[in-house]
Image (spheres, rainbow, N blue to C red):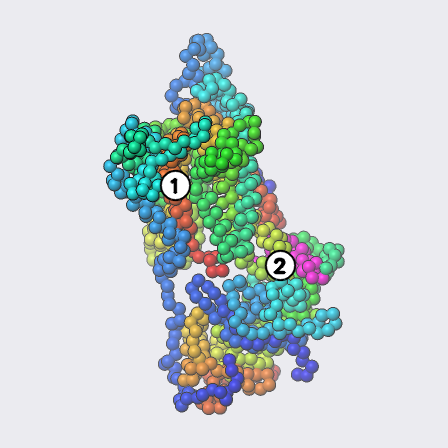
Amino acid sequence: MQDRELILSIRDLDISFQTTAGSVHAIRGVDLDLYRGETVAIVGESGSGKSVSMKAVMGILDKNSTINSGRILFTYQEHGAAKTVDILQLDRKTIRHTINGRHIAMVFQDPMTSLDPTMTVGKQIMEGMVLHDRLGKQEAWKRAVSLLTMVGISDPEKRMKNYPHQLSGGMRQRVVIAIALACDPEVLICDEPTTALDVTIQAKILELIKRIQNEMKLSVIYITHDLGVVAKVADYVNVMYAGNIVERGQIDEVFYDPRHPYTWGLLSAMPDLDTNDERLYAIPGSPPNLMHEKKGDAFAPRNIYALNIDDRLMPPMFKITETHAAATWLLHENAPAVQMPEELRARIERMKEEAAK
Amino acid sequence: MTNDLATVEFLPGDFELKGAETTKLDMNFASQRFWKDAYLRFRKNKGAVFSLITILLIILLAVFGPIVSHYTYQQQNIKETNMAPRVPGLEALGIFNGDETLKTSTGSKLKNAYIVNKETGEKSDTYYWFGSDALGRDLWTRTWTGTRVSLYIAFVAVLIDMLIGMSYGLISGYFGGRVDSVLQRFAEIINSIPTLVIVTLLMLVLKPGLMTITLALMLTGWIGMSRIARAQMLKLKEQEFVLASHTLGASNIRVIFSEILPNIISQLITNTMFSIPSAIFTEAFLSFVGLGIPEPMCSLGSLISYAFKNFTTHPYQIVPPVIVLALLMLCFNMLADGLRDAFDPKMKEM
Amino acid sequence: MRRYIGKRLIISVGTLFVVILLLFTLLQFMPGSPFNDEKLTKEQRATIYEKYGLDQPIIVQFYQYVLHMAQGDFGVSYTISKNTPISQLLQSRLPISLRIGGQAVLLGALIGLILGIIAAIWHGTIWDTISTIISVIGVSVPSYVFALALAYVFGYQLSWFPLLYSADLPFKSSVLPSIALCMFTIASIARFTRSEMLEVLSSDYILLAESKGVYGPKLILRHVLRNALIPIVTVLAPLIVGLMTGSLVVEKIFSIPGIGSLLVTAIQSNDYNVIIALSFIYSAMYIGIMLVVDILYGVIDPRIRLSKEGPHD
């Protein structure tokens, strides 16, 4: 793990939203690190806050949001020297001019609605280049064509003049990726990039992103609720629940040695062909309503391994290894020894055997 | 989130398992009933609430206004024509005391038609709260009687429109296919002819009167509602609860009216509220143009039309009906707006 | 695309035909003979009958009627101006109404757009509220109330503008009526622009554009407006209707010699021919505008314009 360069560091991120029904405390203290060249995945249910945290990084949060506290430190190269800024301290205009598209780019979830229906594909790709890199139209056009080729679109010159509605879902997503790569960013944030696509296309898109990542030396953050995707692409995993990160670690650590009951729940809930259980497992209950502030551990009501202290105090992150940590009181020295559910353990054993073959 | 365990105070029993029975399930969201939700949202909208109150006030005045006054709406008094408003009590403050400024070729002149004794300035014992018109009729009574008529026409026309339009749209959308095509073509043709033309032509054929105006309004107003009903029907037709109802053996009519209708109620109400000012306006417009209620009966529109003739000499005559009309239309529109936002607050969250 | 236009065209012509049919049928039921001038002698009457084909079977009469309408020959006026060809009456009046109407539309659209954009961009602030209030008032209060108010304040009390229309001051005396007429336009367009813009502003592709770094005026002009204003043509139809009805009253209040006041006078004096002729003109205008709107919509929106090609794979 030497020579790891930290480029993005989120600390104590805390965000609320004002709605007509009240204030929603969506992000309640998030820490996250991204090192150059690595792939970090953020996993969680809908409403856990994954997208919101990344929108904060991009500076595209909704107008009714309030950033209560936190820092997002981003390091990038400018004129040959390394520069670090706290994105939360910058105003929107600066973020748009210096960061968006240029250093951090985003791939969105639904390709059917992410593209402007009244602008040709080519123009949309070229827009960022013209804006940030001040390229002339000719140069931008050539570069856009090469980007289309890179993302695997055939007949790129013809496609440049097409409108989004003339392309299929998979092609549109490739275009979105091309747009993201247009100005050579260092960080790519993918917000559920394959959720809206067919299963067959999903694999292709993931491969594409991986290939591009290697070629262009990108650092990637994946937001997903699909553990299968995580297994394919990520180096590190952050498990999010109710606006907090409850477990983080290298992918092997979290998959083969999960420590947080929520992670146990997630892994158990993934059905696979070898499951002999007669019933499908689901985590009981539903995610909490973040309009009501609750003391203690947010997962406690659904946690059959909850301790009394979980009602009073929120657990801090307990270190397991250098890279693996989990926020559960079960890791405290005074806690009773609790093992993960038997079915889960059996499944993990099976997975390890498979991997060893 | 603190990592500093040293500051944390632990209690005995902290690290005991709570036990699986204590896990709570699915109790996080208070289920809000749709109507209660909408009612709360509506109440927050000050403009809409204010409009509702104003409308109720106007209706009250329309019902009781003519009763309070000792004049009737058609009673004429030739000797007391074109008198300015005079209200007992307020006249002590210097306003509404029967004075009016007349612009003549030589300048403006102050005149008071109530004065019977030129030297002493003594006024007669008559009061016209809104003044009187060119035939000596009390404007207060006439204004509120006119409001009654206008409101009556509007409500009746809109009610029938809702019924016709809704049924038309629901049937057209439900059966789809050929039935839908034909019905829609028909509606489209009627829609292509401006309301103005239809009403004008209708008025040519029939004699102007209360029934005729109501009929004219009915003939053109139903299309909007039918569109909404049809759109909703098309949307809901494919949903599972309709299929479920069919599977249970419900007949078509029953499905239309008991499954789908409740889902359209909110749109219905909103659309009704929007149609009322439109109907009031059309009636007033027709009267203004001369196609309206025949004298001596009056509506807001006919009052305005009549008072228009004296607009430059006695402007006060046109003021009450105009204000009532404007207020009614404004308030109904704001009310409808508020209702629509209350039932479907899509974009208010920002 | 061509099929789309063709279909709309056929429907429009068909509707117009139905309208003529209706008018013709109505004409048959009008009391009194078409030329109720007692001074005509029997021979003169016979000649006129022959000229207008009134002695022929109904179908032929109808055919003649359609032909006449198409050529602009609407017959003559009975009561307003005895035996004057209606087309002559129209010739002087139509341009005036069109001009004032046109002024109202342009002025209204411009102000409406600005108000709507302001309300959407500064959504939730005081500007939004002000703009919304203006819109609601403009849509609710009938144009003749505005006309009366404007006439009273600016024409009568302050005498800034002439109270009545006069051909000597064509522009100055058209100011108040245009303003009165355009209030409805302003309100409709402002409300529409605001709601469409708000919907676009919350869409995914705007989020993507922002994540690319597009900001401020460029975002609004190139991405937001371009998308928000496509459906604005759908507002044009009710707008035109509003102008039509509004013009009747406004023309009457300001004594403007346009087709609106002509219609009012015809109604009040029971001049059937004029009423029918004007009904036809209004219907034709309305149907024509709707056709133009439909075609325009197809042209502006690339999704419809290029729909022949379909998605590729």
How far is disc 1 from disc 2 in space, using C-alphas?
46 Å
Q: Nearer the viewer, residue B252 or B205?
A: B205
* Secondary structure found at label 2: loop
Whole-percent x, y for residue B347 in the image: 48, 57
Whole-percent x, y for residue A244 in the image: 51, 76
- Dividing the image into 4 quarters, which one contains the N terminus of chain C? top right
Left of A224 or right of it: where is A105? Answer: right
Q: Which residue type carries mark 2?
A: Tyr
The disc at residue B323 is 1
Q: Residue furthest front?
A: B119
The answer to which quarter of the image holds residue B244 is bottom left
Q: Nearer the viewer, residue A19 or A298?
A: A19
Residue B319's place in the image compared with A187, above or below, is above
Magenta part of the protein: which range? A112-133
* Secondary structure found at label 1: helix
Residue A113 in the magenta stretch? The answer is: yes
Q: Residue at x 58, y 51 (%)?
A: C225
Q: Residue at x 46, y 68 (%)?
A: A24
Q: Which residue type carries mark 1?
A: Ile
The answer to which quarter of the image holds residue B180 is top left
Q: Are marks 1 and 2 in contact (CB under 8 Å)?
A: no
Q: Residue at x 44, y 16 (%)?
A: C35
Mark 1 neighbour density, 10 Å: few (under 14) some (14–19) many (20 or more): some
Q: Magenta-highlighted stretch: main secondary structure?
A: helix
Whole-percent x, y for residue A70 in the image: 56, 74
Whole-percent x, y for residue C81 in the image: 47, 19
The answer to which quarter of the image holds residue C276 is top left
Q: Residue at x 50, y 18 (%)?
A: C84
